[in-house]
Amino acid sequence: MSGRAQLMWDEAVTGYDFGPGHPMDPVRLALTRNLVGALGVDRELEIVAAKPAGESTLRLVHREDYIDAVKAASADPAGADGSYGLGTPDDPAFAGMHEVSALIAGQSVAAAEAVWRGDAPHAVNFAGGLHHAMPGGASGFCVYNDAALAIARLLELGAERVAYVDVDVHHGDGVQAAFWEDPRVLTISVHEHPRTLFPQTGWPQETGGGAGEGAAVNLPLPAGTGDAGWVRAFHAVVPELLAEFRPQVLVSQHGADTHFEDPLAHLAVSLDAQRAVQMACHELAHEYADGKWVALGGGGYAVVDVVPRSWTHLVAIAAGRPVAPETVIPEGWRQEVYARTRRLAPQRMTDGRWPVSWSSWDGGYDPADRLDQSVLATRRAAFPLRGLLP
């Protein structure tokens, strides 16, 4: 196996652009890539620009009629078929939509192939993690579900156990739906409670169906959850499930929208806690998945202050060269931010909350605490289905 992790990057992914005023501003991708470079992290990586996912690959998850609808909307945005979720406020149609969506999917699929075949120990596609797209429709800023496609490709290559861990603030509903009845894929989503956030799914009682019963795990957290609670909840559920499942590959989704500055959600998590969970996923991949780790981006709409720093930490962790939280951000990058956005950039790679303090679930729980109530509800719903004590 090569000792160098892969960073999947093609400048053309910044063409995934729903237009002025849309929260998913592609500047967040360009700024992330340039911060990775400014800090020298890319010197530790193999940079790979993969081909777009072809139609046969897209059909591993998406229906043919939906792919045709995306192609039609891509060629004629004004004629987009709203019954497929296209041309909506969340997913406005734009010229070239199919091509750039397939390109992002291709990066995630190629990342999965590289890790599975041993070409790289880890691979990152921070342009990916578009976890809301359904087999037959666009949803929540997502056209093609690159995360589900990467997992489906791993199964096609012979993987028998793939774990998907999603820590985006929104429920990973599209990935769950794609593998709802498939016991080969364990999906774990840690997200803000569906009572207060799109897509209003991801309840503890959603545990999979048919042969896949027990293969979906959902941990919805109360609005306002901060660092200590978020990290506590992650460790109260994820490691034990991975220890039982013993995945051959870990695919993780790292939406940065859990952050307290994110305009579209209501958690109160810092950059430092995001980094702590990124490091935990890396460690869990080595402990339970022979080091095979595919890491994806996702949501994140504080496009200057949060997303570039969070995903640069993710890339650096995958590269084996974590960036110290106290690191000063290069002035050249800060000037680029101002030139592009007319906004002041952050000065350090921290929110000043490192190291993150949290208490282990093993030390006991507080039955009156809303966060602990949520964790216990998830453990009671899902753990017995996997032969684990709640």
Image (cartoon, rainbow, N blue to C red):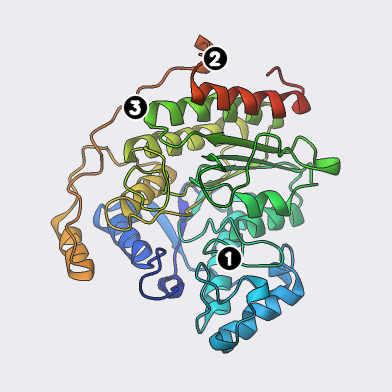
Residue positioned 43% across, 17% down in the render: 359
Which of labels 1 and 2 is toward the front? 2
Where residue 67 sits: x, y (%)? Answer: 69, 75
Lower sequence index among marks 1 and 2: 1
Q: Is residue 51 visible?
A: no
* Quadrant of image for the C terminus: top right
Residue tagged by mark 2? 367
Which mark, by number, is residue 358?
A: none
The kind of residue tagged 3 is Val
The kind of residue tagged 1 is Ala
Q: CA distance from mark 1 to mark 3?
A: 33 Å
Residue tagged by mark 3? 356
Which mark, by number, is residue 105?
A: 1
Find numbered disc 1 in the image and state the secondary structure of the residue it sits on: helix
Lower sequence index among marks 3 and 2: 3
Where residue 111 sits: x, y (%)? Answer: 56, 57
Q: Quadrant of residue 288?
A: top right
Q: Does 300 sit left or right of 182 as displayed? A: left
Q: Badge 2, how many Cα within 10 Å: few under 14, some, many 20+?
A: few
